[in-house]
Amino acid sequence: MSNSRQVGEGLSRTGGEWETYGPSVGPSVAASVASTTATSFENAAASSLLPALPAAIVAALSVLPADYLEFCSGCDRPPNPFIYEALQQLEKENRTKVGFQNGIIIKLAGNNRVIPMQRLTDDDFEIISYVVKIHRTVTGLDVRYNLITDTGSIYAAQLIEENPTVVYLNLMFNDIKTEGGEIIARALHRNQTLKHLRMTGNKIENKGGMSFATMLQINSSLEKLDLGDCDLGMQSLIAIATVLTKNDSIKGINLNRPILKTEQEESTVHISHMLQRNSTLIELHMSKHDIQNFGMQQLCEALYENTALRYLDVTCNRITRDAMKFLGELLKRNNVLEVIDLSSNRIEDEGSMYVCEALAFYNTSLKVLSIVSNNITGKGLIGFSESMKTNTTLSHIYIWGNKFDKETCEAFSNLIETGRLKQENTDVEPYKVDGCVYLAELSHGIKRHYYWTPTFGEVNSAEANSGYAVVPTAAHL
């Protein structure tokens, strides 16, 4: 048997069994290769009904699977069947999804439950990084929920430094620690093309966060940075807030769930000072930030003069009804904010009244409001429904998790029936039992698919991710 091998070759059928040339590719890859020819006629027939792709992208899509096998052979490593299958499916995905006409997005999420998968290791990531480097039509790489460690971060850094076309890199919830975070941050010192980086859930801790703060002083191209659930400390939060007072490229930043060991809200105060000076930040996430009424007051007062921020996320904090006095005043004076997420706080009926007054008579900019799980009863919820009758701008409102009574159910049912509130723009649906109106929960919200992806439907659907639909800070949210 000859050991010579060309790109895309490597399998033969002998005596009913699969034989391999070079390293074993396994039955899953073998079956995928075998099915390619059988389905070629079906793909050709369907292609006439699909939008045309640029010639360079078509050419790249046709050779990506073969190039992957070639690199595996050259490195003497067995191919990952999940990667090979995903590369084979790229052409179909790129043809049928809007927004992929300008480049190829390789999606290798390790939490995909729709197809059989084998999570990527550092070795797998090294091979796929080689493939991406030689294909300048690849503009994005999504490897969330895999097994990439600090060793894999070296390959990520090399990709950032050497590939001038990748604008989106998603490393969400891998096993990258402080050292890996520092390596990636240093690579961004020299990069001028990456627009969106997601480090969510990688425990880079305070030291790694300091490296990203240093990077933000140097890098002038990154537009969105997600450091949520990264165990950032107080020092790194203050450093990032300080740097953002002068950074004019970042449009969206996620600082969710830091590790704070104080009740003084120093980080919130520094972020508030940053908002007074920053004129480019559009989207700010401060979920699980231990914000109390004083911190919310500082944020609201900072936003009186801010003319840039359009999306404010303060979910899962310790904000109560007293802080809503300041938010109500902000909504009277600020006509820039379009999305506010107050989910999982405790504003109650008294706090709701301050917001309702501002929405009914003053505010003309807010489009999306979430008050999910805020211990609001019928009085407060009816106040929101009444404010929507006079406010013509507010188009999305999410209320599930509060205390519905008969009047609340009827009020929101009337809003939906009259067309003032579209069904896809809220998280409740009215239904009747024995002549009485009740509300059922819908899987709609501001960012339902932030941590997970659905097994059916669109990941980036406007119904489930209305915040990003209204304020599209960066692509691939």
Image: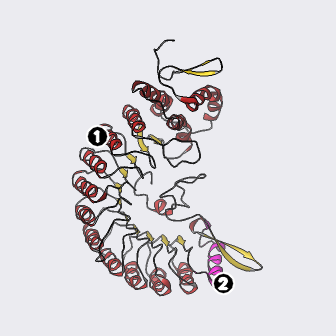
Can residue 200 be seen here? The reply is no
- Range of the magenta residues? 403-423
The residue that mark 2 highlights is: 406
Sequence order check: which comes first, mark 1 or mark 2?
A: 1
Instruction: Say which amino acid is labelled 2.
Output: Lys
Q: Main secondary structure of the magenta part?
A: helix
Is residue 205 positioned above or below 336 on the image? above
Q: Position of residue 326 (x, y in %)?
A: 37, 82
Asked if residue 407 lies in the magenta stretch, the reply is yes
In this rendering, the count of numbered labels is 2
Asked if residue 467 lies in the magenta stretch, the reply is no
Please give left or right for residue 228 compared with residue 276 in the image.
right
Q: Secondary structure at mark 1?
A: helix
What residue appears at the point 45 percent right and 73 percent down from the top-left corner? 342
CA neighbours of label 2 inside 10 A, class few (<14), some (14 to 19), many (20+): few
Can residue 7 be seen here? The reply is yes
**For residue 56, which quarter of the picture?**
top left
Label 1 to label 2, Cα distance in Å? 60 Å
Of 366 and 151, nearer the camera is 151
Query: In the drawing, what numbered circle is on residue 161?
Result: 1
Of 220 and 148, nearer the camera is 148
Query: In the drawing, what numbered circle is on residue 297?
Result: none
What residue appears at the point 51 percent right and 60 percent down from the top-left corner? 465
